[in-house]
Amino acid sequence: MTVQHFRTFIEHAYWGLDKNLAALALTPERLDEAPSEGAASPLNTLRHMYMFERGFLARLQGADVSPADRAPEDLAALCAAWASVREGWLALLDSLTDEQLDEPFELRLFSERYRTTRANVISQFVQHQGQHRSELAVMASTFGHSPGEFDWWDFLKSIGRPLEQL
């Protein structure tokens, strides 16, 4: 993998998140509603995603993360705070070389420490966001507003890089 691959994956992740946010905004009265037993509400899922993304970005930047940190409570404040996290991920990728992706990296998760690579941490972000993006799509659809397709090829088409038909 290259930095450019990861940048495109993260751009795709946020493209899909934006589609979910637009769909969920059509039923603001249901953001605190769990669509099924054992499921988190859309707002709690979004808050979890934000904290994960902010925390792992901070770790990759060498900053400490406090377990006492909390995500904003309402959707507008959460989206406003998330904008800087999104910019931070893209700026981080712009600052890395392909070689730095695979260099040993010490990941601290509060009191635990792990040896990994930046590529593994960024891959975890992409997969984590994909899992919850899919859950949010089901929630929005359950509430009557499907966010539409998240396919990679749809994303590429949306950014002007469609597959070349032979």
Image: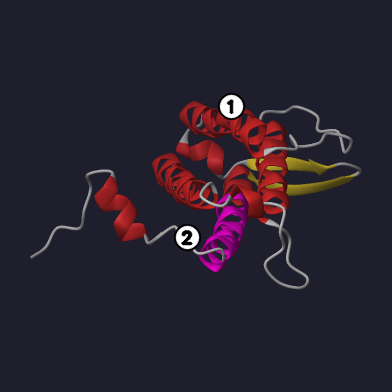
Q: Is 98 or 131 nearer to us in this picture?
A: 131
**Mark 1: few/some/many CA within 10 Å (<14, 14-19, 20+):** few
Q: Is residue 160 left or right of residue 9?
A: left
Picture residue at 48% right of the left edge, 52% below the top: 23
Residue position for label 1: 84
Q: Is residue 25 left or right of residue 30?
A: left
Whether residues under marks 2 and 1 lie with C-beta atoms below 8 angstroms apart, the answer is no
Q: Secondary structure at mark 2?
A: loop
Amino acid type for the residue under numbered disc 1 = Ser
Picture residue at 58% right of the left edge, 46% below the top: 122
* Residue 78, image quadrant: top right
Residue position for label 2: 145
Q: Is 128 or 144 nearer to us in this picture?
A: 144
Q: Is residue 19 left or right of residue 85?
A: left
The percent coordinates of residue 164 (x first, y second) are: 14, 58
Residue most extreme to the right: 111
The percent coordinates of residue 25 (x first, y second) are: 53, 46
Give the magenta range.
Answer: 124-142
Residue 116 belongs to the span the image colors magenta: no
Residue most extreme to the front: 29
Main secondary structure found in the magenta portion: helix
Q: Is 51 or 110 nearer to us in this picture?
A: 51
For the C terminus, which image quadrant? bottom left
Picture residue at 89% right of the left edge, 35% below the top: 68
- First in residue order: circle 2 vs circle 1: 1
